[in-house]
Amino acid sequence: MIIKTKQFVLRPYRMSDADDLAKKINDWRIIRNLALQIFPYKKSDALIFLKKTLPNYKIKNPGSLVLGIEIDGKIAGSVGLHKIEPGHQAEIGYWLAPVYWGNGIMTNVVKKTTAYGFKKFKLKRIYAKVFIYNPGSKIVLEKNGFKLEGILKKAAKKKGKFIDEYLLAKVK
């Protein structure tokens, strides 16, 4: 699956993306908003992620589908559908390098990915969990028609601290 827009390309990752991936995600402003616990994030971490991710592109109904967000020929972020239950639901997750923040890119990435998930996997619901201290991500989802379903108290743990999460969903 490849989706091209004027701003970005959503595409399957390649092993050759390891350097760009490691450089872009290795930023505390990104990592603090992800369930990911690895920081600093090194090329070896990127290689482990890619070796795990690439086989899913060959499976008709993968449990997870993660795509690179390419801008100007380089990886700038990532978007994924996780815990995919065809015909039912999936969880969306994403990140974008800070240099690209504030340009509407992630709003459009979520729009394209959500539409793809509903169509490809015949989903009825796509949901996201957002740390309570990350209002930007909540706004991206709301711009895409996701509705707040509730607040999950102490649902995540990061660096030894419990974090409340917003639960948002878009239902078809």
Image: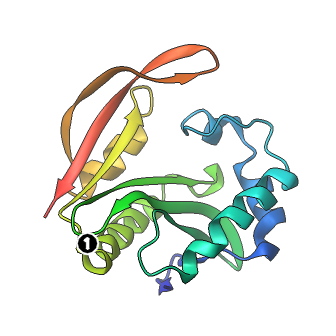
Furthest residue toward left? 172
Q: Residue, x 26% and y 26% (percent of image)?
A: 151
Furthest residue toward top? 161
Which image quadrant for residue 18? Answer: bottom right
Q: Amino acid at mark 1?
A: Phe
Does 23 sit above or below residue 168? Answer: below
Residue 146 shows in this picture? no
Left/right of residue 64 with respect to residue 26 in the rendered view: left
Q: Residue, x 43% and y 67% (percent of image)?
A: 109
Q: How is the image coloured?
A: rainbow
Residue for badge 1: 118
Q: Position of residue 113 (x, y in %)?
A: 38, 69
**Residue 48 versus residue 97: which sits nearer the camera?**
48
Q: Residue, x 65% and y 73% (percent of image)?
A: 54
Residue 112 shows in this picture? yes
Which image quadrant for residue 155? Answer: top left
> Which class describes the residues within 10 Å of circle 1: few (<14), some (14-19), or many (20+)?
many
Q: Quadrant of the C terminus?
A: bottom left
Count of all numbered marks drawn on residues in the image: 1
Does 105 sit above or below residue 8? Answer: above
Left/right of residue 14 with respect to residue 83 in the rendered view: right
Q: Position of residue 108 (x, y in %)?
A: 39, 67
Q: Position of residue 24 (x, y in %)?
A: 73, 55
- What SS does tag 1 mark? helix
